[in-house]
Amino acid sequence: MSDRSLLVVVLAAGEGTRMKSRLPKVLHKVAGRTMLHHVLAATRAAGATRTAVVVGPGREDVAAEATRIVPDAQVFVQTERLGTAHAVLAARAALEQGADDVLVLYADTPLVRPETLARLRAPLAEGAAVAALGFEPEDPTGYGRLVTSGDELVAIREEKDATAAEKAVRFCNAGLMALAGKDALSILDRIGNANSKGEYYLTDAVEIARVDGRSAVAAKADVDEVAGVNSRIQLAEAEAILQKRLRLSAMAEGVTLIAPETVFFSADTVLGRDVIVEPHVVFGPGVIVGDDVVIHAFCHLEGAQLAPGVSIGPYARLRPGTRLDEGVRIGNFVETKAAHIESGAKVNHLSYVGDAHVGAGANLGAGTITCNYDGFFKYRTEIGAGAFIGVNSALVAPVTIGAGAYVGTGAVITSDVPEDALAIARSRQVVKEGWAKDFRAARADAKKKG
Ligand code: UD1
Ligand code: CA
């Protein structure tokens, strides 16, 4: 990685009206994290030494997300929306602090990779003053065009200001730009707004650098990386591109996906070697999966840690705070939440285990329910190692089942069960010989008589 200092300026002051949302556009999520988070993660991986985020007026929510991801990020407010150069200049105080390189990105371009940012920035170390990132969209309408001559970038022309010849250029401006730190302010301060939109265009930086006798160049990126998100349709397109990337990388790292197109990851999903994921599985944020885990079809996981050799599903739901130790088995229609289940324990069918600790080797029969909530507060259930919980038992928390204890089928357990004890908590069975036969005869008789 380069040892040059890097100031990143992320523009997030757009209104995002086409999203038709109460939520600011850049807080919409792709693969479980906000678009702003994706951009900040990419810039961090690309070696950002300082981060400035430009937000619209009153956008405390965007500012809060920025500092959640990069705690020392500086947040600037662009009070009027007068164009992309004007937006960058809202971060003037950060630019004045100086940096070898300055990188400008849009927060609504979440798919850009750190490698591409490094490539965009590299020419600055060789003396270029400006580097722009270009791509070739299927339909260039609406984009600025990169006017090149050999290796040199001559100008970026906005569509509205372009001549017919310039409009014919297919190489378009993605919007990301690298500027030499020592020139950035002097260039930005000279950008005017004498154009068809009356806006301060960041793209004018190219021609100003060239007037100074400095060089400007263009790097090229894949369409899939620089697609901007302006609508829910483009949000779904970005999701599809990112999911494809995450699936390919999981498989490249030794995970078997039987039907990759049906498995959905979060950007932060961590998977070990020789994990097998059957069709139709959704990974929400915060999932860490160890080696040799099998995730059967139709599982939903979020905020869960699975140690090596665990097997879950089909149809298991692991909610936040689930921690499964080595070799644990979670079967069909089982839900877990804030539950630590120790090695070798089994919860094979139709159970809810919440706010609980289950010791090693315990066996929870079908339909075991931890009754953890009284409508006001949550309570914990402790199940000791090697305990056996009979089918259809309700464990009314707070309650402790001692190690090695036995709970008879159909129990409603309201007080603690000592170690190695048997607890039976159900009404005794009553049998009346011939009762059903007599009952039927009496009813049939009554019916006949009307
Ligand atoms: C811009 C580029 C264009 C490029 C296109 C790629 C300029 C002049 N044009 O055009 O060459 O092809 O992006 O998508 O730069 N923003 C602010 N404050 C402002 C204006 C914009 O924060 O005052 C932010 C927006 O939130 C957005 C980004 O900057 O994230 C781009 O602004 P937008 O108005 O969409 O620029 P385009 O006209 O699409
Ligand atoms: Ca745009």
Image (cartoon, rainbow, N blue to C red):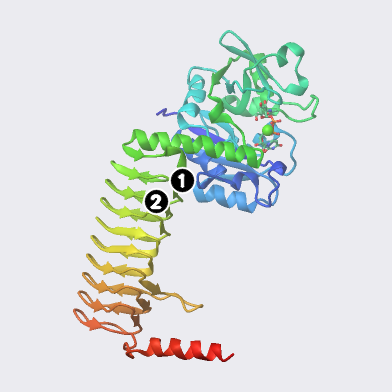
Q: Ligand 1: give its quadrant.
A: top right
Quadrant placement of the C terminus: bottom right
Identify the residue shown where x is 50% and y is 44%: 31
Q: Which mark is residue 93?
A: none
> Label 1 crowding class (10 Å Cα cut-off): few <14, some 14-19, many 20+?
many
Give me the residue at 68% from left, 49% from top.
21
Left of 318 or right of it: where is 7?
right
- Amino acid found under the numbered disc labelled 2: Val
Residue projecting furthest to the front: 448
Q: Position of residue 243 (x, y in %)?
A: 48, 38
**Residue 42 position within the rendered picture, expressed as x and y whole percent measured from the top left:** 48, 36
Q: Residue furthest top?
A: 150
Q: Secondary structure at mark 1?
A: loop
Which one is nearer the viewer's eye here, 166 or 91? 166
Q: Is residue 345 above or below residue 176?
A: below
Disc 1 target residue: 266
Q: Are marks 2 and 1 in contact (CB under 8 Å)?
A: yes
Q: Give above or below for 381 relative to 443.
A: above
Q: Nearer the viewer, residue 179 or 441?
A: 441
Image quadrant assignment for residue 161: top right
Query: For the point 60% across and 49% down, which residue is it?
Result: 63
Please name the residue that numbered disc 2 is placed on: 287
* Marks 2 and 1, how far apart at CA: 8 Å
Closer to the chain start, of discs 2 and 1, is 1
Q: Position of residue 224 (x, y in %)?
A: 54, 29
- Front position in the image: 433 or 182: 433
Give the number of marks.
2
Q: Answer whether residue 71 is visible to the viewer in this image.
A: no
Q: Amino acid at mark 1?
A: Ser
Callout 2: helix, strand or loop? loop
